[in-house]
Image (cartoon, grey):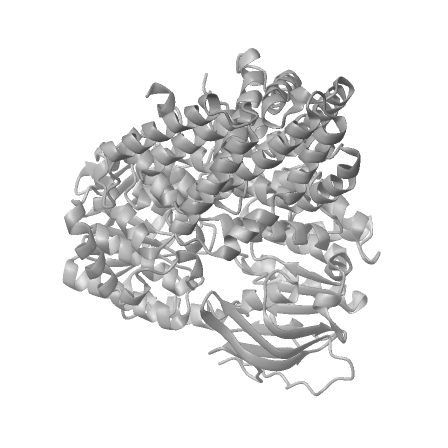
C-alpha cells in the first residue's frame, strides 16, 4: 500500500480511537493489526516485545482511572489500557513494514513535498547512530573536566546544539556537492505509485471504522 | 574541460578580523593535477568551497570563472556537472543510508533518466573498484571505503573539475594509493581537472603537474618545479626521526594491560587479538598510518567504544570502574579541540579546569605564565569559538594539563600548530609532568619537536600493535 | 509554496538534528519514567511520571522556534523529532506523530501570540503556557483525563505547567543564553 496513504489512514484511526471509549473496537483493531503483521512475516519475538513494552504505562493508565476516575471507572480503565495497545499495534503496521525512505519517496512524489524536506530529514535520520555516540562523547568530555552532565544540564544541550549546527552545515554542503539544488526538479529512480486501489482500501477502511465506532452494538 | 581563473579573490569570514584569502590571482589549467598545499587552517578549505559555490563570494570581492564564465552566472543545477568537492571528514558527506542509494540520490539530482541510473552506478563503482560495496550501509564502512564511495559519486556525476579537501585524513595507505591511482586515471583518460589540498605531501612528487602554495600573506603562488625536491624532502623530515627508543621491560604494575584485545570498525578488523602493556610514568608515542585504528584504540581506553577482550587499568578491569572516577584518572585530549570545551569564554574554561583539577600544581600564577608561554594572554575574555584553530588547540591542551589527571591520552596534539607553538607546548608539557608525574600517551604524525618527550614507541600497523625502537 | 521557500536545506537538517540529539539524551530518562510509573501505579497516580517529564519532550519545539526564527519552525522541529522517533525504536507508533504535532503547535502558538517578535522571556513564557494548554487539552481525550476527579486533574495540570516551565522555560532559556553568548547563531536564519 502507498506509504503516505497508509500513514494518513492510521493517523485518522489513532485520532478517532482517542475520542471513542469502546473496548471491543480497540481489541478488534489490535487483532486486525496483529493479523496484518503476521501476514507480513513479522517475527513472533517482535510481537511479544510489543506486548511487553507498553505494559507498564498501560497499567499506570489503568490504575489511575480505576482508583481516581469518575463515572464508570472500570470501563474507562480498560478503555485506556486497550487504547495504548491499539496505538502500539496499529503504529507497528506502519513502522515495521515501511521505512523512512519509502515514506520520503511517497511524500515527495505523490504530494510534492519539497525535496529539501524529504532529503534533509533523511540525512539527519541516517546520522542517528553517530548522534548516539556523540552524546556519549559529550558526557565523557564533561566527566574528564570534572563535570557530570545530566539531562537537566544546559551545557549538555548547548554542546548538542553546537554539534548540530556544525553537522547541518557540513551535510548541506555535502548534499549540494552531490548535485542537490533546493527547489529544482529531480528525476526519480524509485517509483512510488499512488493508484486507485490505495484510495479504495483507504475509503473502505474509513467506512468500516465509522461502522465500528457508531453503528455496531458492541455491548 | 575547464580553465579556472581566480581574479583578485578576497574572502573574509563574518566574525574574522583578517581576510582568509587576500587578493588571490591564479589560473588552474584544464586537465592538470594540482596539489594545493600550506599548513592546516590557512584557507585551503575556504578556497575550495568558494570554487564549488558552497560559500558565496560577495560580488565586489573578485571573481572565480570556469572558461571565462563566472561561477555566479552558472546555473546552480549545472554546477555539479562542472565542479564537485570531496570533503575531509568522510562522516558527514552522505545523505542516504547505503552506497547505492547515495549514488541514486546524486544522479537524480543531476536529472539522469531513471533507466540510465543503474548502469551509471555499475560503471562508477567498477571504476573505483568497489562494486562489492554497492548495497552496504555507509555507516559500516571504513574511512578509506567511504572516500572511495565519495569518488564514485563524483565519477558518476561526471563532474569536469574534481576538488579534494585533505581527502586522506582518515584513509589507510592502501586505499590512499588506490584513490590516487584513480585520480591520475581520471586526468589522463577522462581529461578531468583535479585540485587536491593536502598538508601531507607523501607520494605526490611524481604525480602532480602543478604545486600551488598558500603563502603567509594569504595569497597563492605556483612553485617552480625546481623547488619541488626541497619541498617534498622538507616534509618527509617532519614525519621522521632518527632517534631510537628502548623496548620496555615487564613492569611490576602496568598502567594498562591488554588481554586478548581486539578492535573492529563495522565489519573491518582494526586490531588482531593482542596482549600488551603500557607503562606508568613513562610517555609512549603511538605512530601508524591513517585509518589504522589509533583513535579507536584511545576511544576504547576511555570506554567510548566497544572492544573484544579485556583492558585493565592498574590491574582493574576498566569496565568494572565507576565512569566518573575513571574519567578523573584517564582523560582524553580529543582530536577536535571544540569537543573538549564546555563554556563560552577562555576565562570560564580556565576557571572550570582549575576548580575541578585533580592536583594543585596549576596555581593562578602558573596558569598566567602558561598563557604567556602559549601566546594566549589577552584572549581571556574572548569567546572560544572565535579563536583560530591553533589557539583552540593550545587552549585545549592547557585545560587538560590543568586538570592533572594521572593519565592523559593525546590524539594528534600538534595538528595544525606552527613550529613555534609546538616548541612552546612541548616545553610546557615537559616542565609540568616533571613535577606532576603524569603519564602521557600520544598519537602523532608530526614528530618534529615532540621526540624529547617520548620514552617508548608503539607502532600500530597492519592490525598489529607492537613496541619498536625506530620510526620506519 | 511561499512558506517553504524561506527554509534552507541546512535549516531543515539543523532542526531535525536538534530533535534527534535531544531525543537521544531523553532516552536516558526512561528509567526515571519507569520507576516513577511503577511506584505510583498502586495509588493511581502514575500519570505524574508523564507530567513531570513532559516538559523535556517539548524542549526541541521551543528551542527550534528560538534558534530558527521562521514561521512553523517550532511545529516542524517537534514533528521531525517525532517522525524520527517513530521510525527509530519508538514503540508508540502514530500517536508519537500526533503528540509531536500537538506539542510543536503548542510551542508555536506561544511565538504566534507574541507575533514572532519576542525571542526572550516573554516569547518563551507564552510558549510554555500555550504548550501546557494545548497538550493538556489533547490528554483530556487521549489519556482519558476528562474522566479524572477534579483534584487530580488540577494536580496534573499544575505539575505539567511546572515541568514545562522548568524544562521548556528555564532550561531552554539557559541554553539559548549560552547560544547567544557564543555567537554561533549569527549564521542561522531569521524571517523578518
Q: Is residue B346 or residue A166 the one in the foreground? A: A166
Residue drawn at x 51%, y 69% as measured from the top left: B264
Determine if residue B423 is in view: yes
State left or right for residue C81 relative to residue B279. Answer: left
Q: Is residue B11 or residue B272 the one in the foreground? A: B272
Q: How many marks?
A: 0
Residue drawn at x 28%, y 34% as measured from the top left: A198
Residue B377 position in % (x across, y down): 68, 45
Q: Is residue B95 or residue B191 the one in the foreground? A: B95
| Residue B229 found in image quarter | bottom left
Q: In this picture, is B182 found above or below B106?
A: below
Q: In this picture, is B375 found above or below B306?
A: above
Q: In this picture, is A219 found above or below C31?
A: above
Point out the residue furthest to the right here: B360
Residue B66 position in % (x across, y down): 20, 42
State left or right for residue A199 relative to residue A120. Answer: left
Determine if residue B15 is in view: no
Q: In this picture, is A169 found above or below B392?
A: above
Residue A93 position in % (x across, y down): 43, 43
Residue drawn at x 34%, y 54% as measured from the top left: B164
State left or right for residue B238 relative to residue A98. Answer: right
Residue A209 position in % (x across, y down): 42, 28
Residue drawn at x 42%, y 55% as measured from the top left: B90
Amino acid at each position: 500500500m502507498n506509504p503516505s496513504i497508509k500513514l494518513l489512514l492510521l493517523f485518522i484511526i489513532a485520532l478517532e480511537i482517542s475520542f471513542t471509549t469502546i473496548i471491543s473496537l480497540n481489541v478488534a483493531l489490535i487483532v486486525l493489526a496483529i493479523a496484518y503483521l503476521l501476514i507480513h512475516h513479522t517475527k513472533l519475538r517482535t510481537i511479544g516485545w510489543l506486548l511487553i513494552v507498553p505494559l507498564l504505562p498501560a497499567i499506570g493508565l489503568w490504575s489511575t482511572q480505576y482508583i481516581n476516575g469518575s463515572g464508570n471507572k472500570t470501563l474507562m480503565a480498560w478503555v485506556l489500557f486497550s487504547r495504548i495497545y491499539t496505538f502500539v499495534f496499529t503504529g507497528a503496521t506502519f513502522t515495521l513494514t515501511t521505512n523512512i525512505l519509502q515514506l520520503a519517496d511517497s511524500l515527495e512524489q505523490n504530494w510534492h513535498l519539497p525535496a529539501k524536506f524529504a532529503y534533509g530529514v533523511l540525512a539527519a535520520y541516517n546520522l542517528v547512530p553517530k548522534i548516539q555516540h556523540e552524546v556519549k562523547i559529550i558526557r565523557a568530555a564533561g566527566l574528564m573536566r570534572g563535570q557530570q552532565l545530566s539531562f537537566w544540564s544546559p551545557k549538555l544541550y548547548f554542546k548538542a546544539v553546537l554539534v548540530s549546527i556544525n553537522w547541518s552545515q557540513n551535510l548541506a554542503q555535502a548534499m549540494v556537492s552531490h548535485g542537490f539544488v533546493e527547489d529544482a526538479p529531480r528525476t526519480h529512480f524509485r517509483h512510488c505509485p499512488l493508484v486507485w486501489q490505495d484510495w479504495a482500501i483507504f475509503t473502505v477502511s474509513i467506512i468500516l471504522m465509522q461502522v465500528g465506532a457508531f453503528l455496531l452494538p458492541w455491548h | 574541460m575547464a580553465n579556472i581563473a581566480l581574479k583578485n579573490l578576497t574572502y573574509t569570514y563574518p566574525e574574522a578580523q583578517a581576510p582568509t584569502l587576500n587578493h588571490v590571482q591564479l589560473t588552474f589549467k584544464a586537465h592538470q593535477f594540482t596539489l594545493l598545499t600550506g599548513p592546516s587552517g590557512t584557507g585551503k578549505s575556504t578556497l575550495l568551497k568558494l570554487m564549488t559555490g558552497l560559500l558565496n563570494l560577495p560580488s565586489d570581492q573578485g571573481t572565480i570563472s570556469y572558461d571565462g564564465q563566472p561561477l555566479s552566472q552558472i546555473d546552480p543545477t549545472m554546477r555539479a556537472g562542472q565542479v564537485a568537492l570531496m570533503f575531509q571528514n568522510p562522516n558527514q558527506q552522505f545523505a542516504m543510508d547505503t552506497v547505492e542509494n547515495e549514488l541514486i540520490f546524486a544522479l537524480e539530482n543531476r536529472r539522469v533518466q531513471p533507466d540510465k541510473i543503474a548502469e551509471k552506478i555499475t560503471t562508477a563503482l567498477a571504476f573505483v573498484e568497489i562494486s562489492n560495496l554497492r548495497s552496504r550501509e555507509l555507516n559500516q564502512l571504513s574511512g578509506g571505503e567511504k572516500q572511495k564511495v565519495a569518488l564514485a559519486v563524483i565519477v558518476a556525476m561526471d563532474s569536469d573539475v574534481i576538488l579534494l579537501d585533505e581527502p586522506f585524513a582518515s584513509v589507510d595507505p592502501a586505499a590512499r594509493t588506490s584513490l590516487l591511482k584513480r585520480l591520475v586515471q581520471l586526468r589522463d583518460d577522462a581529461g578531468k581537472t583535479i585540485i587536491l589540498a593536502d598538508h601531507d605531501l607523501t607520494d605526490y612528487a611524481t604525480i602532480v603537474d602543478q604545486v600551488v602554495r598558500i603563502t603567509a600573506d594569504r595569497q597563492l603562488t605556483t612553485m617552480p618545479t625546481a623547488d619541488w625536491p626541497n619541498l617534498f624532502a622538507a616534509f618527509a623530515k617532519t614525519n621522521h626521526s632518527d632517534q631510537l627508543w628502548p623496548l620496555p621491560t615487564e613492569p611490576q604494575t602496568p598502567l594498562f594491560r591488554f588481554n586478548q584485545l581486539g578492535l573492529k570498525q563495522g565489519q573491518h578488523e582494526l586490531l588482531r587479538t593482542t596482549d600488551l602493556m603500557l607503562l606508568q610514568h613513562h610517555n609512549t608515542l603511538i605512530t601508524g598510518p591513517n585509518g589504522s585504528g589509533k583513535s579507536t584504540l584511545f576511544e576504547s581506553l576511555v570506554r567510548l567504544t566497544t572492544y573484544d577482550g579485556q583492558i585493565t587499568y592498574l590491574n582493574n578491569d576498566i569496565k568494572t570502574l565507576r565512569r566518573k572516577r575513571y574519567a578523573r584518572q584517564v582523560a582524553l585530549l580529543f582530536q577536535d579541540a571544540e569537543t573538549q570545551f564546555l563554556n563560552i569564554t577562555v576565562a570560564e574554561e580556565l576557571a572550570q579546569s582549575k576548580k575541578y583539577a585533580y592536583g594543585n600544581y596549576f596555581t593562578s600564577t602558573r596558569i598566567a605564565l602558561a598563557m604567556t608561554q602559549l601566546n594566549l594572554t589577552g584572549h581571556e575574555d574572548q569567546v572560544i569559538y572565535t579563536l583560530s584553530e591553533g589557539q583552540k588547540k593550545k587552549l585545549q591542551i592547557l585545560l587538560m594539563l590543568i586538570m592533572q589527571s594521572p593519565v592523559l591520552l593525546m590524539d594528534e596534539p600538534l595538528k595544525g600548530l606552527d613550529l613555534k607553538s609546538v616548541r612552546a607546548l612541548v616545553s610546557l608539557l615537559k616542565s609540568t609532568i616533571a613535577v606532576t608525574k603524569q603519564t602521557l600517551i600520544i598519537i602523532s604524525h608530526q614528530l618534529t619537536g615532540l621526540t624529547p618527550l617520548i620514552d617508548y614507541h608503539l607502532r600500530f600497523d597492519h592490525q598489529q600493535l607492537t613496541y619498536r625502537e625506530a620510526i620506519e | 509554496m511561499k512558506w517553504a521557500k524561506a527554509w534552507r536545506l541546512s535549516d531543515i537538517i539543523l532542526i531535525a538534528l536538534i530533535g534527534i540529539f535531544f531525543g537521544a539524551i531523553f532516552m536516558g530518562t526512561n528509567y526515571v519514567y519507569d520507576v516513577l510509573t511503577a511506584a505510583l501505579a498502586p495509588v493511581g497516580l502514575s500519570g505524574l511520571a508523564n507530567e513531570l517529564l513532559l516538559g523535556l519532550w517539548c524542549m526541541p519545539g521551543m528551542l527550534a522556534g528560538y534558534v530558527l526564527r521562521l514561521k512553523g519552525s517550532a511545529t516542524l522541529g517537534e514533528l521531525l523529532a517525532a517522525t524520527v522517533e517513530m521510525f527509530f525504536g519508538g514503540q508508540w507508533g502514530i500517536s508519537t506523530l500526533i503528540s509531536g504535532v500537538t506539542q510543536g503547535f503548542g510551542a508555536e502558538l506561544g511565538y504566534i501570540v507574541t507575533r514572532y517578535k519576542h525571542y526572550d522571556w516573554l516569547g518563551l513564557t507564552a510558549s510554555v503556557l500555550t504548550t501546557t494548554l494545548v497538550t493538556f487539552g489533547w490528554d483530556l481525550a487521549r489519556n482519558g483525563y476528562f474522566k479524572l476527579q477534579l483534584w487530580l486533574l488540577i494536580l496534573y495540570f499544575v505539575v505539567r505547567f511546572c515541568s514545562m516551565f522548568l524544562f521548556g522555560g528555564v532550561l531552554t532559556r539557559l541554553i539559548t543564553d549560552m547560544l547567544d553568548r557564543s555567537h554561533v547563531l549569527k549564521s542561522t536564519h531569521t524571517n523578518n
